[in-house]
């Protein structure tokens, strides 16, 4: 005789009432299209003007932002360039980003990008911010004071260490 096999009852799912999956938001679709364009541009091969092109693309993207995100974007750009001159400017999902050896280290997402109540300054997994088993990688920004600017500068320097 063979031993009885343990069987599990299948989990009963409750149908969502009056809920319909709508897919991606308009903002998410735009971000994906931006990323596709960025990948196509990088697939065309390296060009001499890439660094200048990345810088001008980031500055143009910041200039398109509504206030107060535009002012924050300009100030963040200056802080990042001063704190880590080795980082190159580029767009990442249509957002200003800063990369080392082609890999994004940090980025700025305006509040308008996904219709949120605050802008976000974040770091990717290539940033050297590890502190034990838990550490922050994204920060909400409502305004930039000298305190926040100093903290961002220190974080960018640490991310590059």
Image (cartoon, rainbow, N blue to C red):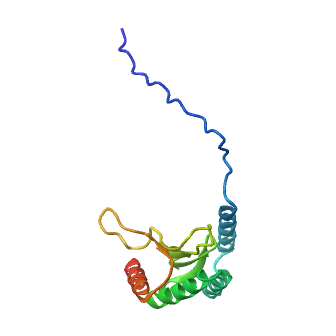
Q: Where is residue 140 in the image (x, y as percent from the top left)?
A: 48, 72
Note whether 92 is above or below 12 in the view shown. below
* Relative image position of residue 77 (x, y in whole percent): 54, 86
Give the image location of residue 37, x and y in percent: 70, 70
Outermost residue, top side: 1
Residue at x 65%, y 80% (from the top left corner): 65
Whether residue 9 sits left or right of residue 57 in the image: it is left
Using residue 116 as the reference point, say whether residue 33 is left or right of it: right
Residue nearer the viewer, 48 or 17: 17
Seen as rendered, the residue at the extreme left is 132
Give the residue drawn at x 59%, y 82%: 68
What residue is shown at x 63% (from left), y 86% (from top)?
Answer: 59
How many marks are shown on the rendered structure? 0
Which quadrant is home to the N terminus? top left
Vertical comparison of 63 with 121: above or below:
below
Q: In this view, does 155 lie to the left or right of 93?
A: left
- Image quadrant assignment for residue 16: top right
Q: Is residue 116 above or below residue 73?
A: above
Q: Residue at x 66, y 56 (%)?
A: 24
Q: Where residue 155 sits in the image (x, y, percent)?
A: 39, 79
Instruction: Using the rendered view, name the quadrant where residue 66 is placed.
Output: bottom right
Q: In this view, does 9 lie above or below 122?
A: above
- Could you say which is closer to the camera, residue 88 or residue 65? 65
Quadrant assignment, res 28: bottom right
**Quarter that holds the C terminus:** bottom left
């Amino acid at each position: 005789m063979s031993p009885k096999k343990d069987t599990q009852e299948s989990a009963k799912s409750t149908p969502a009432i009056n809920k319909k999956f709508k897919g991606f938001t308009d903002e998410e679709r735009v971000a994906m299209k931006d990323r596709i364009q960025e990948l196509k541009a990088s697939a065309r091969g390296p060009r001499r003007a890439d660094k200048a092109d990345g810088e001008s693309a980031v500055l143009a993207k910041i200039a398109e932002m509504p206030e107060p995100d535009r002012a924050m974007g300009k100030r963040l750009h200056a802080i990042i360039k001063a704190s880590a001159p080795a980082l190159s400017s580029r767009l990442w999902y249509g957002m200003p980003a800063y990369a080392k050896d082609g890999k994004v280290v940090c980025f700025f997402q305006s509040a308008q990008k996904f219709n949120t109540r605050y802008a976000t300054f974040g770091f990717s997994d290539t940033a050297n911010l590890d502190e034990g088993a838990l550490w922050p990688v994204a920060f909400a920004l409502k305004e930039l004071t000298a305190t926040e600017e100093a903290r961002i500068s220190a974080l960018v320097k640490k991310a590059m260490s």
